[in-house]
Amino acid sequence: MDSLATGKKLREVWEAIRADGLEIPYPQFRVYVSRIRMRQSRQHRSETRTTPHAAADSNAVPQSESPVRPDPFRNVREQREKKQSDGFNFDPFSIQKQFIE
């Protein structure tokens, strides 16, 4: 991405990568670069939304915030917590079934 930022063309960067030994088709390379640019754009937008308050106060000490990583299993954890808080839990696939005798 640094090469692109300095003004090199996308195809030139792709050719340099291929010369270094990374075999990737040009269309796929374009998709990856597009995704990286979108991610950086989203990060920049979120940073600019949080910084105007700090920019208004020139004496403010910048706080180092750790980036929030996405949790792909968040919805699964939320469903488990919800089930645990419910009074009745039925697991149809349980192997520890106790039947009425």
Image (cartoon, rainbow, N blue to C red):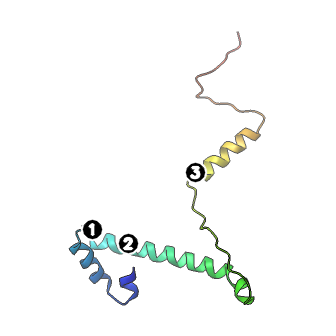
Asked which secondary structure carries label 2, the reply is helix
x, y percentage for residue 47? 62, 78
Circle 2 residue? 31
**Above-or-below relation of 31 to 6:** above
Circle 1 residue? 24
x, y percentage for residue 35? 44, 72
First in sequence: mark 3 vs mark 1: 1
In the image, which is nearer the foreground, mark 3 or mark 2?
A: 3
In this rendering, would 43 be left or right of 62? Answer: left
Q: Residues within 10 Å of mark 1 (few under 14, many from 20)?
A: few
Q: Which quadrant, please, contains the C terminus?
A: top right
Q: In which quarter of the image is residue 1?
A: bottom left
**Above-or-below relation of 49 to 74:** below
Q: How crowded is mark 3: few (under 14 residues within 10 Å), some or many (20 or more)?
A: few
Of 64 and 89, nearer the camera is 64
Separation of marks 3 and 1 at Cα, in angstroms: 31 Å
Circle 3 residue? 73
Q: Residue at x 75, y 33 (%)?
A: 88
Residue that protrudes farthest toward the top in the picture: 101
**Above-or-below relation of 80 to 13:** above
Asked which secondary structure carries label 1, the reply is loop
First in sequence: mark 3 vs mark 2: 2
Q: Quadrant of residue 22?
A: bottom left
Separation of marks 3 and 2 at Cα, in angstroms: 26 Å
First in sequence: mark 2 vs mark 1: 1
Q: Residue at x 71, y 13 (%)?
A: 100
x, y percentage for residue 72? 55, 54
Asked which secondary structure carries label 3, the reply is loop
> Looking at the picture, which amino acid does disc 3 mark?
Phe
> Looking at the picture, which amino acid does disc 2 mark?
Val
